[in-house]
Image (spheres, coloured by chain):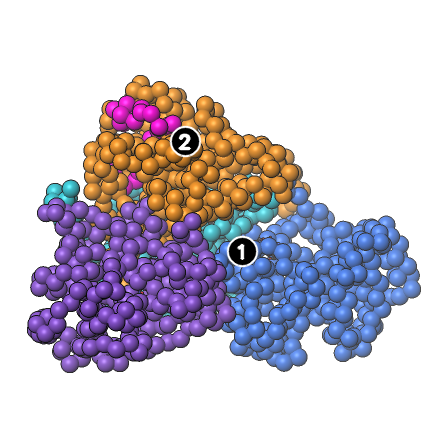
Chain colours: A orange, B cyan, C purple, D blue
Amino acid sequence: MADLRVNIGTLILKNPVMPASGCFAYEYEQALDLSRLGALVTKSVTPKSRIGNPVPRVCETPAGMLNSIGLPSHGQRYFLEEIAPHYSAVSAPLVASVSADTAEEFGMACEVFSAPGIAAIEANISCPNLEADGRAFAMSATDTHAALHAMKKRTRLPIWAKLTPNVTDIAEIARAAEDAGADALVVANTFLAMAIDPETRKPRLGNVMGGLSGPAVRPLIVRMVFQCHRAVKIPVIGCGGIVTAEDAVEHLLAGATAVQVGTASFLDPAAMVRIIEGLEAYCGRHGVARIAELIGAVSIDPGITDRWLRLAQQSG
Amino acid sequence: MADLRVNIGTLILKNPVMPASGCFAYEYEQALDLSRLGALVTKSVTPKSRIGNPVPRVCETPAGMLNSIGLPSHGQRYFLEEIAPHYSAVSAPLVASVSADTAEEFGMACEVFSAPGIAAIEANISCPNLEADGRAFAMSATDTHAALHAMKKRTRLPIWAKLTPNVTDIAEIARAAEDAGADALVVANTFLAMAIDPETRKPRLGNVMGGLSGPAVRPLIVRMVFQCHRAVKIPVIGCGGIVTAEDAVEHLLAGATAVQVGTASFLDPAAMVRIIEGLEAYCGRHGVARIAELIGAVSIDPGITDRWLRLAQQSG
Amino acid sequence: MKVESHSCEVLQHDWVNARYKYLRLRCPAPLARATVAGQFFQLACPHGETEQPFLRRPMSVYGIGPQDERIEFLYHVKGVGTRALERLRPGGTLEMFGPLGRGFRFSPQWQRILLVARGVGLATMAPLVPLAARAGVGITALLSARAPSDLMQEEFLRGAPAQVHAVYDSDGSSAVDRVEALLRDVLLRQRFDMVYTCGSNRLLFLMQKMQMRGEAALEQQMACAMGVCLSCVRLFNEGGEKVFRRVCCEGPVFPIATVSGEVQFG
Amino acid sequence: MKVESHSCEVLQHDWVNARYKYLRLRCPAPLARATVAGQFFQLACPHGETEQPFLRRPMSVYGIGPQDERIEFLYHVKGVGTRALERLRPGGTLEMFGPLGRGFRFSPQWQRILLVARGVGLATMAPLVPLAARAGVGITALLSARAPSDLMQEEFLRGAPAQVHAVYDSDGSSAVDRVEALLRDVLLRQRFDMVYTCGSNRLLFLMQKMQMRGEAALEQQMACAMGVCLSCVRLFNEGGEKVFRRVCCEGPVFPIATVSGEVQFG
Ligand SMILES: Cc1cc2nc3c(=O)[nH]c(=O)nc-3n(C[C@H](O)[C@H](O)[C@H](O)COP(=O)(O)OP(=O)(O)OC[C@H]3O[C@@H](n4cnc5c(N)ncnc54)[C@H](O)[C@@H]3O)c2cc1C
Ligand SMILES: Cc1cc2nc3c(=O)[nH]c(=O)nc-3n(C[C@H](O)[C@H](O)[C@H](O)COP(=O)(O)OP(=O)(O)OC[C@H]3O[C@@H](n4cnc5c(N)ncnc54)[C@H](O)[C@@H]3O)c2cc1C
Ligand SMILES: Cc1cc2nc3c(=O)[nH]c(=O)nc-3n(C[C@H](O)[C@H](O)[C@H](O)COP(=O)(O)O)c2cc1C
Ligand SMILES: Cc1cc2nc3c(=O)[nH]c(=O)nc-3n(C[C@H](O)[C@H](O)[C@H](O)COP(=O)(O)O)c2cc1C
Ligand code: FES
Ligand code: FES
């Protein structure tokens, strides 16, 4: 049996599969054994409570879906008192996702979450629904740095920076997060998108715009994982469009150390366990002793362009 | 029968449906009557000849495809002498797509294409395959402005600026293009993406990265069409993921004046005619007398967020 | 595990009328034993040439058992997903997961229940009928439909004895004021231990106005159907406060009295 | 229009051996009259629960006619698309467009032709067999396969008379040097008006090395299959120059002599 363990900084995960924030809650214990997961990542919590966006909050798109849930939240206290205890008996480490409106608030939120039972904090600096037109910290290297910096000052827990894919140059943002001390990157949140019903002429989401996730975005995110992996030394956690173990392997080969599964769980609540079992099978089939061997192991032929150009000189 | 005509600046199109650059050539006359199209848009031509990228140049993805064709081109002279004449008997206006390495070269290319038989020039300032990591003019407002400015100086033909979706803020680029005198925007080119075969560990494209197109990207592009339409006064031509007439209507409602169809023609070479006929049927079904009524006509309820927030105050 | 994906075999799949279809499945597990009236499943509608539904479709169970591995649905062919579902043929396979949500309360000790249904609401409440019939609980049903051809009274009762009041749009008898008069009349004559409704907001709010106590099954756009994604919320009045509840797991069945008007979109 | 999409009915769909499947269609148009040996169609493989092939799959016609609306394919079940295709049942529908590409040259005046095939190459060249047989043109075939069970000689000849040389990996007879000796021997004994090959680059380059003149059918990853997208290029030597040609429309059949080695990816 292959060794599926991977390290995210000092945290050792028994396997590289964990849920994506907002796509997981303890209700999934009805469908899978939570202790089998590499880690647990919770829905983003904001310091203050919020009601979220108008319905409809989801709609489907080709090979994907839009959501504009909009971070309904009962606040951090509620999380610590009512949510976190549900996971105390689960062996997988608990990663608490936070979202906030200012760098300072992000810092304070991390202080509040520096509590027993929380193994790491995922900083959702990228949620496209919060501000007008989806602008977020992670759309600017400066803001990313400021937010991460504020957080690192207030906690000794590892901070995972969750980036937005809605940027021109993800590697630049990745470097800014690393510079500010991020312990890992999650690549990435959803793509800002919109769908209109031609029959009613109305947007399909109450909030007009929302975030695109699911298999449709996988090739985009795999590219970004690849770019981030080349740009930074900290681990990259791939998140986007993973449905099967083979999709997870694609992320690992591109440079991810671990992966998060979101939308796929909506189609099959046991998807994450299926993926873990599929990874074991993949490693067996391919003689992979340690899954960590796959990280960034995409096999790129460095000579191909040269050979192709040499051809060019010969051709008309 | 509804009036399907739309105006792109001074150009009157008999209907809003045209091919996307690189997804059309006269070979399609075997599958459809080219004169039925709103316009003809040709594969991007570069001033100098190029051989394009290594094979494999395409692969499929969930609800989409990647391409890294890489602008093989026989140059502009060849285009004027060998390609353009094929369309002389076709009533639809011919739009020649150009691509170049510098703003100056773009300008010169426009001068060369200011020839009889060419009704407009589409400036592909966004092809993600040309430069390392997909960087292109349209990734920067300054470069966009410079390229468009150089082109407007050299020709009196309308210039359509084809933007890249790989940016943080498409509206900013749209405004830069408009400021520099662009006559219309094409929104947009493909998304930089990557796919890896988990069995071989190799990228699925010879060029490692390529552009994602097809239905998968439609919600992303519809959002960008909406944002650009709000940002500029010049017409926006929607391009991304259109397969059916309803998809075209979605683009129009978001703010497109016309639409381009790319990948869908690969699945059915007569797709564009199917879409034109579907638009006629849609207009009939919905009592739309002039298709231009649909442009930007998405019905957004301005009061919804207020009503939702009022609820919030009542709720716990 | 309580919730699992199952590959079910289509045993029967027939049109009931021009818009509704009946589907009977053989499940690879004794799902009928685990399912109660009012619960639902998430169905993976098959992909076709023109339709590629991505999300699962929630469907209440219309029939539970009698065999342990038999589950039935009755559904309205409406959009992308149900059009694709409709094309499944006997012998084909349907993936689904469930059972999901909280079902209706029911007690065999009761004397009589009232069912107020319109459209698909009928499918959702149908499993209550054999439950009541077997326990000797009397059934009164108010069925509302566009026209007599749409009523599906047979499909609802499946032979069980019941007192049925049918109202139609076609003859104006389904107008709210006329239904109100009818309901008042029924309530004068009979005592109900429980009242259920599903399928019409208009009927639901009428019953609320009339201060009828009982249960309503609601619908909302869903993604996960397991309480995780927070997409399916609706607003409720609970103890003087407005609160959001997830239809998929805190419902789909809620006390009639608590259902609050919703911010209507658009 | 020369190229159109057609909804075809699956008449027969059977395994030929463990890896190949035979598919017979009834087309809504007299496609057989418009199709020649070596041409291909773009098949829309149906979407399934696990496979959602997006692009069309190119497949050579394996059988043309005898009825005007009958087209046959013989294909290797290999990846996502063909696994999905495989699940189509008789009575089901397959969307496809074509015929596409340039087929093989053939003249009924010829005396004898040589066909050198391996694997799927056999499907592509198969329509030449009845053409030759009907015209009284002699057929010599060199068939290469992994093992006798993979040969598909019956499927290739379908009863037509031919002189067949079978070589196998399993007994080493398919090794290039042994095939070269065999071919030299064959060429010594018989004169061929035309030589065709498909299915093996190794055989193709051997024949090129032996300066055999004739035609080869090639493959390449395709998107549009109509000459539009430029994805399917391969390199050729023409008049001393290297040029790119589109396999889909300038081929898939090319003169053996012109095919150039390709930049191998990875
Ligand atoms: C708990 C529950 C039980 C249901 N039981 C039944 C039943 O027994 N019989 C029946 O005919 N219908 C039932 N419905 C409604 C049924 O789910 C929708 O009619 C169906 O999803 C429509 O899908 P579509 O793709 O055909 O329509 P489309 O309009 O194309 O659907 C687009 C999207 O909207 C969602 N959607 C559309 N209508 C509804 C709706 N009314 N409620 C929730 N989501 C919706 C779909 O699931 C899909 O994601 C139930 C809904 C819920 C929430
Ligand atoms: C002109 C032409 C005629 C062909 N005729 C036949 C035939 O008669 N019988 C037969 O068994 N096969 C034939 N092939 C090969 C056949 O197209 C591929 O085996 C098939 O596309 C594989 O699809 P897949 O999804 O099962 O495999 P996958 O490997 O999953 O395919 C992934 C992608 O690669 C493409 N691809 C894979 N292999 C090939 C290939 N060899 N050539 C071109 N594209 C490929 C697919 O079309 C698809 O887009 C022909 C190919 C061409 C170009
Ligand atoms: C319904 C829904 C809710 C989400 N909520 C959050 C959230 O609260 N915080 C966050 O960082 N990401 C959130 N996301 C984004 C996911 O964590 C993930 O980044 C995205 O869905 C891409 O992964 P996928 O393709 O596997 O779904 C949400 C996604 C969905 C679909
Ligand atoms: C095979 C292929 C080649 C393309 N070549 C070009 C090109 O030469 N110039 C250009 O501006 N866009 C090119 N594009 C992008 C398309 O014009 C279009 O912007 C994109 O495909 C999105 O539209 P679609 O989803 O309808 O395909 C190409 C796209 C494909 C798929
Ligand atoms: S559908 Fe996800 S919480 Fe109800
Ligand atoms: S497949 Fe498009 S040019 Fe050949």
Res C15 seen here: yes
On whether residue A15 falls in the magenta region, the answer is no
Crowding around mark 2 (Cα neighbors within 10 Å: few <14, some 14 to 19, many 20+) is: many
Residue C42, image x, y percentages: 37, 57
Q: Is mark 2 within 8 Å of ligand 3?
A: no
What range is drawn magenta here? A106-131
Which residue is more in the foreground, B10 or B81? B10
* Residue holding disc 2: A93
- In the depicted structure, whether residue D173 falls above or below residue A89: below
Residue ID at (89%, 66%): D190
- In the depicted structure, whether residue C258 falls above or below residue D71: above
Residue ID at (43%, 64%): C68
Residue ID at (17%, 46%): C243
Q: Is mark 1 within 8 Å of ligand 6?
A: yes
Residue C190, image x, y percentages: 12, 72
Q: Is B22 left or right of C81, judged from the image as shown?
A: right
Kind of residue at disc 1: Ala
Mark closer to the observer (1, 2): 2
- In the depicted structure, whether residue C261 falls above or below residue A179: below
